[in-house]
Image (cartoon, rainbow, N blue to C red):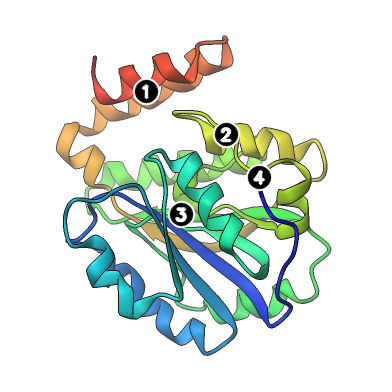
Amino acid sequence: MIKADADSSYGLSIIIPTLNEAETIAATLQPLQVLRNKGCEIILADGGSDDATTEQAAPLIDQCVMAEPGRAKQMNAGADLARGRWLLFLHADTLLPANFSSFLMALKTTNKQWGFFALTLTGRHIFFRIIEAAINARSKITSIGTGDQCLFVQRATFVDIGGFADMALMEDIHLCKTLRKLSSPWVCRDKVLTSSRRWEQHGMIKTVLLMWRLRLAYFFGASPDRLVKIYYGE
């Protein structure tokens, strides 16, 4: 159950789901420290890491919640603790834009209820520039962003729709489909920087084909439990 109350002293709560991210979590959290002085709350929603993720994160966050593993469960648990008027869901391998402060200012006056950012990938190969362009164009046309694009939503709206659906995969797509029935998204041109490690580890073409296979299967009604088996391997 997502709580409806919020503390008006916080403009934005940033919720980060983690699972064994000790190698990268400090690099993700360090740039966020200046935002804490601007009225942002940082919440770690850990899915049971057995490395030093939570220990390394402790001095760099405001709250930590332990949840059942699974991004939907973890992000809902983080949202349940959040005290901000806005919620932003940030992956542990993604960095916010350098001029994020301008986004914070715009949050105070926007009439939008939700949105996401354009993205750029860390990989240097020219193929990553093509992937970026395709992702950004697709999300703008369809009004559907992915978790890598830092979905953000007014807390009241998030509560009204019941938060993330309890799904093993595609919880981000489901959330966007639900939200776009209410209003069009705010698609921020400022780009977040997200890791290309999965493409690099598993092969660029193979990973792109896998992503499209999963999205098509979901479109045609495949269950998230089946999709997560495909995603991580039988």
Of residues 34 and 58, the one drawn nearer to the viewer in this rendering? 58
What distance separates the C-alpha of mark 4 from that of mark 2?
20 Å
Q: Which amino acid does label 3 sit on?
A: Leu
Q: Mark 3 sits on what residue? A: 119
Categorize mark 4 by other alpha carbons within 10 Å: few (<14), some (14-19), many (20+): few
In the figure, is residue 231 to the left or right of 20? right
Tag of residue 173: 2
Which of pointers 4 and 2 indicates the residue nearer the eye?
Answer: 4
What distance separates the C-alpha of mark 3 from that of mark 4?
31 Å
Q: Is mark 3 on a helix, strand or loop?
A: strand
Task: Estimate the x, y position of residue 178 in percent, counting from the top left.
Answer: 72, 35
Q: Which amino acid does label 1 sit on?
A: Val
Q: What residue type is labelled 2?
A: Ile
Which of pointers 1 and 4 indicates the residue nearer the eye?
Answer: 4
Which of pointers 2 and 3 indicates the residue nearer the eye?
Answer: 2
Which of pointers 1 and 3 indicates the residue nearer the eye?
Answer: 1
First-in-chain label (1 vs 4): 4
First-in-chain label (2 vs 3): 3
Q: Mark 1 sits on what residue? A: 228
Categorize mark 1 by other alpha carbons within 10 Å: few (<14), some (14-19), many (20+): some
Q: Which amino acid does label 4 sit on?
A: Met
